[in-house]
């Protein structure tokens, strides 16, 4: 099976046979999503399981930006959200861009698109009902 771990709408870990993101350091992303403040930098560390059952640690530097406030419809209900981008780059120049759609009223991350590993790519999540 597949197992996801989240905190404040930010994915912390993913367990899937063969390509696990075993853990991550996401405190900066959580602060960005909950505070919705663009322009600040933070570190992100991902521990990715390798094919040989080892772990590859990858460190990124991230910065947040906003695409502004917009409407997001989920199951015939429209929410006013701020569209946030977390742009992360490692020392080799690899880039990850995670997206979060955050309710401007209460901070709920209604929808997100987050990196899950080289094999899986990105995973889209959406809260259907709170």
Image (cartoon, rainbow, N blue to C red):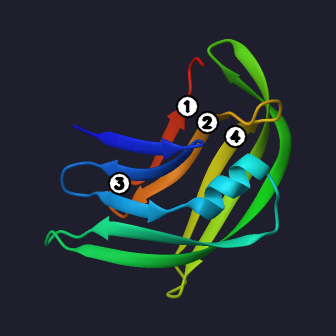
Q: Is residue 111 left or right of residue 101?
A: left
Whichever of labels 3 and 4 marks the residue nearer the N terminus, that label is 4
Badge 2 vs badge 1, beta-carbon distance below 8 Å: yes
Residue under numbered circle 2: 111
Query: Mark 1 packing: few (<14 Cα in 10 Å), some, or many (20+)?
Result: few
Q: Which residue is mark 4?
A: 101
- Look at 27% across and 40% down and name the residue there: 2
Nearer the observer, 45 or 99: 45
Res. 126 mark: 1
What's the distance in space between the residues labelled 3 and 4, CA to CA? 21 Å
- Give the answer, above or below, for where 77 lies relative to 7: above
Would you say the residues marked 1 and 4 are in contact, meaning their CB atoms lie under 8 Å apart? Answer: no
Vertical arrangement, residue 25 with respect to residue 103, above or below = below
Please give the residue where the numbered disc 3 appears in the rendered image: 120
Earlier-in-chain disc, 1 versus 4: 4
Q: Residue most toward the top?
A: 76
Work out whether residue 27 or residue 118 is closer to the camera in this orientation and state it: 27
Residue 54 screen position, x and y as percent: 19, 73
């Amino acid at each position: 099976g597949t197992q996801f771990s989240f905190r404040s709408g930010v994915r912390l870990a993913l367990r899937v046979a063969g390509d696990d993101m075993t853990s991550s350091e996401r405190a900066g992303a959580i602060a960005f999503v909950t505070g919705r403040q663009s322009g600040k930098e933070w570190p992100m560390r991902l521990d990715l399981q390798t094919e040989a059952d080892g772990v590859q640690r990858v460190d990124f530097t991230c910065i947040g930006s906003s695409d502004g406030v917009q409407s997001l419809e989920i199951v015939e209900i429209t929410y006013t959200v701020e569209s946030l981008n977390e742009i992360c780059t490692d020392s080799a120049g690899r880039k990850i861009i995670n997206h979060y759609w955050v309710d401007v009223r209460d901070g709920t991350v209604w929808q997100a698109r987050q990196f899950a590993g080289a094999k899986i790519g990105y995973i889209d999540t959406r809260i259907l009902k709170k």
